[in-house]
Amino acid sequence: TTEELVWLRRLGVTKVQMGAQSLDDRVLALNLRGHTSADTLRATTLLRAAGFKIVLHWMPNLLGATPESDREDFARLWSHGFAPDELKIYPTQLLETAELYKYWQRGEYQPYTTEQLVDLIADIKPLIPPYCRVNRIIRDIPSIHVIEGNKRTSLRQDVHIEMKKRGTTCRCIRCREVKGQIVDPDTLRFNDLVYSPSSAEEHFLSFITPEDRIAGYLRLSFPSPTAPDLEIPELANAALIREVHVYGQSLPVGSERSGAAQHIGLGTRLLDKAAEVAHMQGKQRMAVIAAVGTRKYYEKRGFRQQELYMVREL
């Protein structure tokens, strides 16, 4: 609800994770999830309108699902307006303490084998858009507790090995971030990826190395006329900066290293690019959902703290 989002902002929250698990209402009902796909879409739309970063959890192999239905369900994440910023893929794991165990005993549920799971995830991972980061591909549940099905906790590596055999790649943020790579700012290419989730126009602004690695990115959101009215004054006619993230070598405060992405001004350049895009869209201000620890950073770049957000007039 709007009231809950305002309360989360007062607490300093900038990111919300939600257990969507599935976007198939039949599967959700069978697994007694207590929510529908429409509920998930409404929640993600509200969060985006308030500038929050959105992390969804998705679970293949739920009761009633098949590898084929899971492939169809995964596509809904990107085609039905959800468009999460980050994703955790949590394959269902059969534990003796879970109610699902009784279904398995009666022969009404069958976990995927490791081979089936690797095949499924290797199929769907290349479909992930470049604006999303895949944080996890397996839960850290000790294999001794898993009754049947996949027991490998190195599933991400297994999937990447399979994709390499197939000659396919994943372009999600985690697979393309520069990590410790030296960055030459003069060779970086700026990219503005535009996409349209529910009730918003999103711009994923990024600086890319010649090797197609992401050195830094900014999420810039423009609520559409159908976006929920949150009645938050500082968001009126504002472009929303939902995240600024620069990769590279972490260094002690005050020190510098040539080529360290965090120390070549990429954050400032991204904010300036965002200001250009926002101005072209006719916006009067930019509002950033700043964490408490980043407020000084934004103050130095023209933002001023208001009640719930920091705002920079254009």
Image (tube, rainbow, N blue to C red):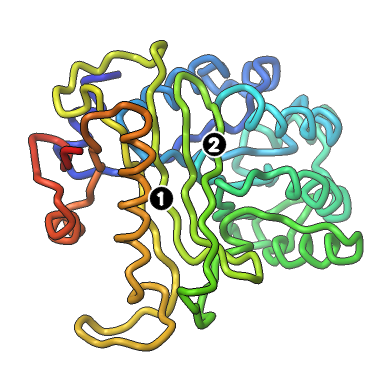
Q: Residue furthest right?
A: 166
Residue at the (29%, 86%) spot, across then down: 256
Left or right of 245: which side holds 128? right
Residue at the (81%, 52%) spot, across then down: 122
Q: Which mark is residue 194?
A: 2
Camera-nearest residue between 114 and 2: 2
Residue at the (42%, 44%) spot, across then down: 219
Measured as percent of width and height from the top left, residue 149 is found at 79, 50
Q: Which residue is mark 1?
A: 218
Q: Amino acid at mark 1?
A: Leu
Measured as percent of width and height from the top left, residue 46 is found at 37, 23
Q: Amino acid at mark 2?
A: Val
The local crowd at label 1, few if under 14, some if 14 to 19, many if 20 or more residues have their Cα within 10 Å, is: many
Q: Which quadrant holds the C terminus?
A: top left
In the displayed structure, 232 sits above or below 213; it is above
In the displayed structure, 226 sits above or below 266; it is above
Measured as percent of width and height from the top left, residue 19 is found at 51, 35
Camera-nearest residue between 145 and 247: 247
Check whether the beta carbons of the residues at disc 1 and disc 2 lie within 8 A of each other: no
Which type of secondary structure does the marked residue at label 2 adopt? strand
Q: Which quadrant holds the N terminus?
A: top left
Q: Quadrant of residue 52?
A: top left
Which type of secondary structure does the marked residue at label 1 adopt? strand
Left or right of 82: which side holds 68? right
Please state the total of marks drawn on the protein image. Answer: 2
Residue at the (63%, 70%) spot, across then down: 210
Q: What is the spatial separation of the Cα atoms under label 1 and label 2, in whole angstroms?
A: 12 Å
Camera-nearest residue between 294 and 87: 294
